Image (cartoon, rainbow, N blue to C red):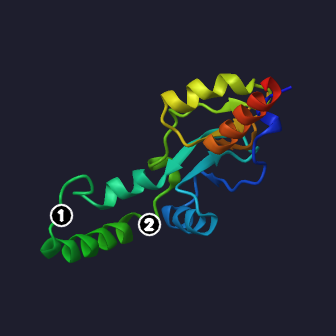
Amino acid sequence: MNIVKDYMYRTLVSVCQKDSIEEVIRIMYQAEMSVVPVVNEENRFLGTIYSENILKNIIPEKYGFLDSNRLLFEINQAAETLAEIKNRQVKEYMSTRVSPIREMDKMYKIADIMLDNKESFLFVVNEKGNLRGYITRADLLYYLLDVCNDIG
């Protein structure tokens, strides 16, 4: 049938808006994910928190050039800033602009979404908006391989 549900990952970690930044960093590290979905108590998808959002707030010159003499200073400064914000809540740093896709969506529709948004994966919800999993660019490629094999 070639729907998202057939290709998505169902194992997923998530956080709540009230979780601390420290908790999120630990979860990202353990799950080896740089972005984590944010859900409410009913597992309804609310948005995402990216490691980049946290880094932008603790490394002032993240996008600038750092010479080797300033690197140690910047790392120490980032650690001090992180110590100041680690107890703040996820809701202060999360993004609500990310729209999830539905598990019953057709696979061919997600290619545009994934490539237009430059996302390496998208979160998947059911018809009630509850988080169900995620889908990656690798899953999109696997779908295309299935289509290719059906054609030839």
The amino acid pointed to by label 1 is Leu
Which numbered disc covers residue 66? 1
Q: Is residue 71 visible?
A: yes
Q: Residues within 10 Å of mark 2 (few under 14, many from 20)?
A: some
Task: Note whether 60 is above or below 107 in the view shown.
Answer: below
Residue topped by disc 2: 86
User: Toward the viewer: 61 or 117?
Assistant: 117
Location of residue 3 in the rendering, given as x and y in whole percent from the top left corner = 80, 28
Residue at 69% x, 56% y: name it.
13
Residue at 30% x, 68% y: name it.
78
The single residue placed furthest to the right in the displayed view is 1
Residue at 22% x, 57% y: name it.
61
User: Toward the viewer: 116 or 54?
Assistant: 116
User: Toward the viewer: 151 or 116?
Assistant: 151
Real-space Cα separation, disc 2 to disc 1, in angstroms: 24 Å
Location of residue 124 in the rendering, given as x and y in whole percent from the top left corner = 71, 37
Helix, strand or loop for disc 1: loop
- Looking at the rendering, in which quadrant would you find the C terminus? top right
User: Toward the viewer: 98 or 91?
Assistant: 98
Q: Earlier in the sequence, mark 2 or mark 1?
A: 1
Mark whose residue sits in front, 2 or 1: 1
The amino acid pointed to by label 2 is Lys
